[in-house]
Amino acid sequence: MTDEPRVHDASFAANESLWDAWTGIHATGEFYDLDGFRAGGVRLRPDEIEMVGDVTGKTLLHLQCHFGIDTLSWARLGARVTGADFSAAAIDLARSLADDLGFPDAHFVRSNLYDLADALDGQFDVVYTSRGVLGWLPDIRAWAKVVAHFVAPGGTFFITEAHPVMDVFENEGVGPAELRLSYPYWEHADPLRFEVKGSYADPEADVAGTEHAWGHSIGEIVSALIDAGLVVEALVEHPFLDWKVDFLVESPDGKWRLPPDHGPGEIPLMFSLRARKPG
Ligand SMILES: C[S@@+](CC[C@H](N)C(=O)[O-])C[C@H]1O[C@@H](n2cnc3c(N)ncnc32)[C@H](O)[C@@H]1O
């Protein structure tokens, strides 16, 4: 799609091997509750289902699908799904889950996001991506071009993701409501490098590697989608995060928020965006 991200191949390789290792852990741990999913669960938030709308009979491409349980959740809601991810272990597991759980039409493609147009034909009624995807990508404008390439005319793009504002704060080794400004807000050429032990789903797991990560501002994300030809229809900022970080506390509904007694200040923790390709 573009030559630009190629300068990041070493970073992609490091991240890919981390994701291959993490996939094995995520398949068995509580975080992803694979047993609950096997038993018939749908692992999507009600508000994202509402924002995407009825997917019955629609084609849906899930970018950075990990091992496919969100992808197959959309299939349970009636979509004809394709998932794509660069982790071979994740795609193997997604394919075997689809076989085991009776989704013969679910299709999974192994590819780097930036190479996907060479690996996958067609356009889709819905292009979907969620929860922990953009931080692995160096170039948000090239990402938006890939997204727009795959949305069919008249089709929908939807993302729900950590809010870039919350990503500027240190999220490990800090106390509740301790907002320590630590990371860039706008896109940067050199990756942030984090030595990782374990996984976000299981900090005790026997895995080590180096995570290569990039930030992108909300303005850069929205502008990249507009410049790629999409029309932004809705942008919602949420006061919760779907996963644990150390400056938040868990609410009774299982989401992570600033502690109730932290004072009157607020920051957005996630965002959801829906865009349409003119038809
Ligand atoms: C946190 S998961 C997001 C998926 C899903 N929301 C979840 O919670 O499992 C991030 C996914 O991005 C994939 N990924 C990271 N960098 C990628 C790249 N350059 N191309 C394709 N996939 C990538 C990883 O393999 C991983 O499966």
Image: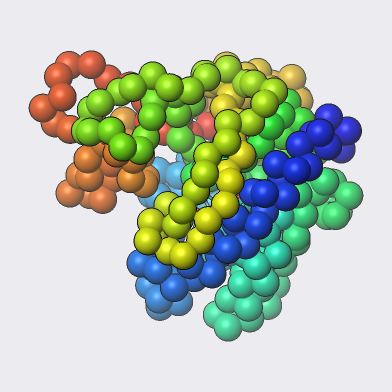
Quarter occupied by the C terminus: top right
Q: Nearer the viewer, residue 186 or 266?
A: 186
The spot of residue 146 in percent (x, y) is: 77, 38
Query: Which of the 4 quarters of the picture holds residue 198?
Result: bottom left
Task: Answer above or below: position of 69 versus 8.
Answer: below
Q: Residue at x 52, y 44 (%)?
A: 195
The spot of residue 130 in percent (x, y) is: 53, 45
Query: Which of the 4 quarters of the picture holds residue 78?
Result: bottom right
Which color scheme did the rendering employ for the protein? rainbow
Task: Answer above or below: position of 147 versus 220.
Answer: below
Q: Residue at x 23, y 27 (%)?
A: 177
Report whether 92 appears left or right of 185.
Answer: right
The spot of residue 196 in percent (x, y) is: 49, 48
Query: Which of the 4 quarters of the picture holds residue 150?
Result: top right
Q: Nearer the viewer, residue 76 or 9?
A: 9
Residue 123 appears in the figure: no
Task: Answer above or below: position of 45 versus 148.
Answer: below
Residue 48 appears in the figure: yes
Report whether 61 appears left or right of 202.
Answer: right
Q: Residue at x 58, y 44 (%)?
A: 211
Residue located farthest toward the left when viewing the structure as drawn: 261
Q: Nearer the viewer, residue 199 or 110?
A: 199
Quarter occupied by the N terminus: top right
